[in-house]
Amino acid sequence: MNNSAKIEENDLYNYNLYKAANTLWYFNELIHGGFSGYNSVKFKNKEGVYVWLEKVNIEDIYFVGELAENGISQQVLINDVIDWMIIEDGRLIGGYTIRHYRDTLDEDTKVSFDNDFGVKIDDGNDFFKPDLATPEGAIITIENFYSEKNLMGVLSCKDFMEEAKHLLEERSVNVTEELQLEIAGTLKASFIEDLESNGFPSFNDIERNFVLMEKHDNKCLIREKVIYPDGVTVNNTLWVAYSEAQEWKVLNNIE
């Protein structure tokens, strides 16, 4: 790994760190499961330099492995890791700081970087936990319920009152409780009718990656790129809101 590359720390970089932190659970599961391919984690050493630890094992609250630059054994607290990566079938999974750095390069330099790196770098596959603790996790959760054709599960990931408020505010309409209730009821009825008429979409065996488009106090606009097993890609752009129940809920999909 090239530890001398200067990485621009901006909002996009912070989002990539967020993605790395919220997908680390997947890396940990792979390691616990005996993953035998290349794996490494990134952390800041005592000299304040970010380095990679390879051939990782998990011992209690530590990652234990070998430093990439010299092969010396070391352990690092799991909570001190800022990034992770594996190579699977010649393809980079994770490696969010690497992706961020690569995206700052011009096309010619990017080609040289890819040749030196020697691993396929595409849009990746983001393994957020399927729960309502993050906006991306909420999207994955509702898509899992879609695939199961579980209407109650799908509805548990929605907040029609918040969606009604959002739509009214977008149109600069004065939001009253009565109007919000009326719009929310209409949205819910229309949503259920559409599923009953057109069926549940399937998200089985897909890959997905997320981009944060906008961020507000309690709402995020997330673009999700879905890659189906046959190679077809679909982009969904979804508003996700943080509810009073302290859970993220999926609102409307922007066509």
Image (cartoon, grey):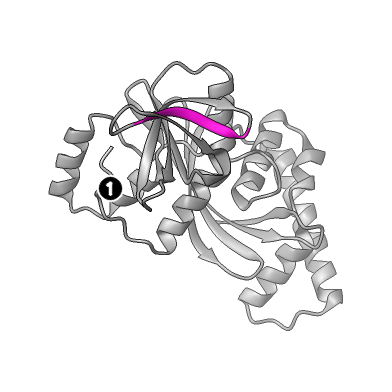
> Residue at position x 82%, y 40% from top?
152
As drawn, is 245 to the left or to the right of 134?
Answer: right
Comparing 254 with 88, the one in front is 88
In the rendered image, the vertical position of residue 88 relative to residue 161, given as above or below: above
> Residue at position x 53%, y 55% from top?
222
Answer with the quarter of the image where residue 182 lies.
bottom right
- Identify residue for label 1: 102
> How many discs appear?
1
Instruction: Check disc 1: other Cα within 10 Å, few if <14, some if 14-19, many if 20+.
Output: some
Where residue 161 appears, as percent x and y from the top left, is: 79, 64
Q: Quadrant of the N terminus?
A: top left
Residue 66 in magenta stretch: yes
The region drawn magenta spans 61-67
The amino acid type of the residue labelled 1 equals Arg
Where residue 175 appears, as percent x and y from the top left, is: 76, 79
Where residue 31 appears, as percent x and y from the top left, is: 53, 23
As drawn, is 213 to the left or to the right of 141?
Answer: left
Dominant secondary-structure state across the stretch colored magenta: strand
**Can residue 255 be seen here?**
no
As drawn, is 211 to the left or to the right of 7?
Answer: right
**Can residue 19 be seen here?**
yes
Answer with the quarter of the image where residue 128 lies.
top right
Where residue 241 appears, as percent x and y from the top left, is: 68, 60
Q: Secondary structure at mark 1?
A: helix
